[in-house]
Amino acid sequence: DSEIKCIVFAGTYRSNEVNNAFPLTRFLADIAEKHISVIKIELENIGREAANDLISDAICKATLDSKMLADIVYRKTSGNVLFLTQFLQSLYAEGLFWFSLDTESWEWDYQGIETKTIPKNVINLLTERIIRLSVLTQHA
């Protein structure tokens, strides 16, 4: 449509998992051939300090108080934000991370988290969570 002056399109992919046959890659190549301006934003994993900031904000604790938890979580997730947040949710679901009504704050089982085996990536973590759902829920 020649009347359209601006459009925003957001596409996501893992650059290490796509090739020239990937639909989004072909789409971007077609746009480039038409000399249309494209802005790419590449997101990297966050650093250890940013992971601690994210966790401390989420659990309303000072960064000094969340540092031990953040260090373990960062080491196990390599700072992948989706993996980090999903890992925290799995810790909560497994009772290794909980909100204490007695202290009115988040607490965690440091040793349990430290020894917990973790899937190699977020896809495997989510797959494990889906498998734990009832068959009815899995097929809903």
Image (tube, rainbow, N blue to C red):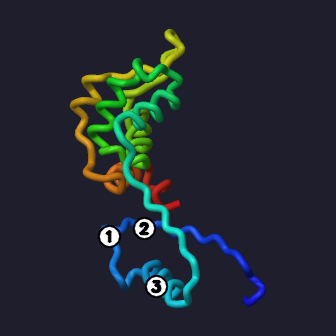
Residue 85 position by quadrant: top left
Report helix, strand or loop for mark 3: helix
Residue that lies at the very extreme toward the top in this rendered image:
102
Q: CA distance from mark 3 to mark 1?
A: 17 Å
Residue 55 position by quadrant: top left
Q: Could you say which is closer to the camera, residue 98 or residue 71?
A: 71
Report helix, strand or loop for mark 2: loop
Q: CA distance from mark 2 to mark 1?
A: 8 Å
- Three-letter amino acid code at the position of disc 2: Tyr
Label 1 Cα neighbours within 10 Å, binned few <14 / some 14-19 / many ≥20: few
Would residue 115 appear left or right of 44 to someone viewing this image?
left
Asked whether disc 2 touches disc 1, contact meaning CB atoms under 8 Å apart, the reply is yes
Q: Position of residue 104 (x, y in %)?
A: 54, 14
Q: Position of residue 91 (x, y in %)?
A: 38, 34
Label 3 Cα neighbours within 10 Å, binned few <14 / some 14-19 / many ≥20: few
Residue at the disc numbered 3: 29
Q: Position of residue 100 (x, y in %)?
A: 48, 17
Residue at the disc numbered 1: 17
Label 2 Cα neighbours within 10 Å, binned few <14 / some 14-19 / many ≥20: few
Task: Identify the residue shown where x is 46% and y is 85%.
Answer: 29
Label count reads 3
Task: Identify the residue shown where x is 47% and y is 27%.
Answer: 56
Q: Is residue 132 visible?
A: no
Q: Position of residue 11 (x, y in %)?
A: 52, 69
Label 3 or label 2, whichever lies nearer to me, is 3
Disc number at residue 13?
2
- Closer to the chain start, of discs 3 and 1, is 1
- Three-letter amino acid code at the position of disc 3: Ala
- Three-letter amino acid code at the position of disc 1: Glu
Task: Identify the residue shown where x is 26% and y is 43%.
Answer: 118
Disc number at residue 114?
none
Q: Is residue 117 visible?
A: yes
